[in-house]
Amino acid sequence: MRPKLFSYLLTLTLAGLAAWAAGSLCYRYLQTPWTRDGQVRANIVGIAPRVSGPIVRVTVHDNQPVHEGDPLFEIDPEGFQAQVDLAGGQVQNAEANLKQQTQNLQRQTELYRTRVNALQDFQNAQDSFEAARAQLASAKANLELTRTEVVADAGYYNASEVNRCTEHGITPFIPKSDTSANTARGLYGKSQFKYDAVKDVYICPAGDTLTYRFATVELDREIKYYRASHCKNCPLKSRCTRNKANRTITREANEHLMEAMAARMQAQPEKFKLRKTLAEHPFGTIKRWFGYTHFLLKGLAKVQCEWSLTTLAYNLKRVLNLVSFEKLMAAVA
């Protein structure tokens, strides 16, 4: 009787331990699901923006795949600009304080050398100087955190929008597409004319100057007109203009911002190359390869669902191109 009871107890004990082990493994799997490549430590990850403020637009939805550089949400630009101004003011205050502490340290150093002041006063001045320098470094770092950059394609090339970005502390990188009618006709476009900001004139390919004539407002844009004076006898006129009079060039009031942006684009071409890598491939595949040029449904919820299915199809295609069908099946098996 006793051996059988002992056998039953041992069997129940082993069964209980096996059930406990199975339950622990199941719980662990549910909490931290694993794959062949690594572990997922969290199902929901909090995102903290570098600047705070009211969110005016959300560009993603639940479970949408995103890539580096994709916009997630837009913060109210007015609050953003206020933080930029505040950070700039903190930098100015820190610079003024550092200047004051530098002068104080120089004065205390001289007094200590002449034995007028005690060592403690000199050390206090040194500590104040180091604290002011650290405060300035912190203020500059905070200012950098409130600045941002935006990269867009040529379709967003617009002087008013670039001006708006600049006013809100945003540095835009947008390439310019040459839409000049003269360029399309094989004539000299505006890009062939150099602007002299000091003299406020344009220099044509023949070396003549186009001087300022008048300004006007067209479609809420302030435009200045520049005109040449000696086109009639110019040997390059046939390649410059079909106008019987002299060549005219227009310039917007904030065109200097566009010229500065063009200089940034030329100095940092890698920024736009990175955007092409991150954004152009998905949209090119979806629009050209899939033939998905427009949404078929209406309403935000339905369009979000439609877009989720589209991105799912793209992601599957991308995975198959990267790891092959066999490796994908082996990974999910």
Image: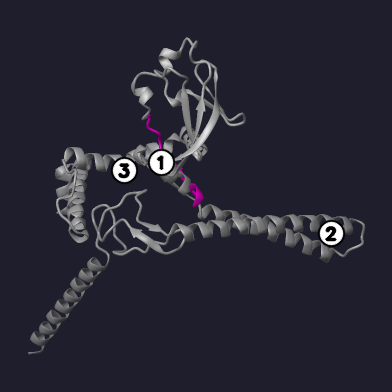
Q: Identity of the amino acid at label 3?
A: Ala
| Residue 72, position as x, y percentages in the image | 35, 56
User: Three-letter amino acid code at disc 2?
Assistant: Gln
Which quarter of the image is occupied by the C terminus? bottom left
**Which residue: 45% across, 26% down?**
191
Label 3 neighbour load within 10 Å: few <14, some 14-19, many 20+: some
Q: Is residue 134 visible to us here?
A: no
Q: Quadrant of residue 325?
A: top left
Residue 16 located left or right of residue 99: left
Give me the C-alpha separation between circle 2 and circle 3: 59 Å
Nearest the viewer among 134 and 329 is 134
Residue 324 as seen in the image, left or right of residue 79: left
Res 111 seen here: yes
Mark 2 nearby-residue class (10 Å; few <14, some 14–19, many ≥20): many
**Which region of the structure is painted magenta?**
166-178
Residue drawn 48% across and 61% down?
79
Instruction: Give the residue drawn at x 13%, y 81%.
Output: 12
- Which residue position holds label 3? 279
Above or below 23: residue 204: above
Q: Secondary structure at mark 2?
A: helix
Which residue does the numbered mark 1 point to in the structure image? 158
Is residue 156 a member of the stretch shown in magenta?
A: no
Q: Secondary structure at mark 1?
A: loop
In the drawing, does residue 327 fall left or right of residue 189? Answer: left
Q: Residues within 10 Å of mark 1 (few under 14, many from 20)?
A: few
Amino acid type, callout 1? Asn
Q: Where residue 241 appears, x then y in whole percent?
A: 41, 18
**Which of the image's four quarters has the N terminus?**
bottom left
Residue 174 magenta? yes
Q: Which residue is mark 2?
A: 108
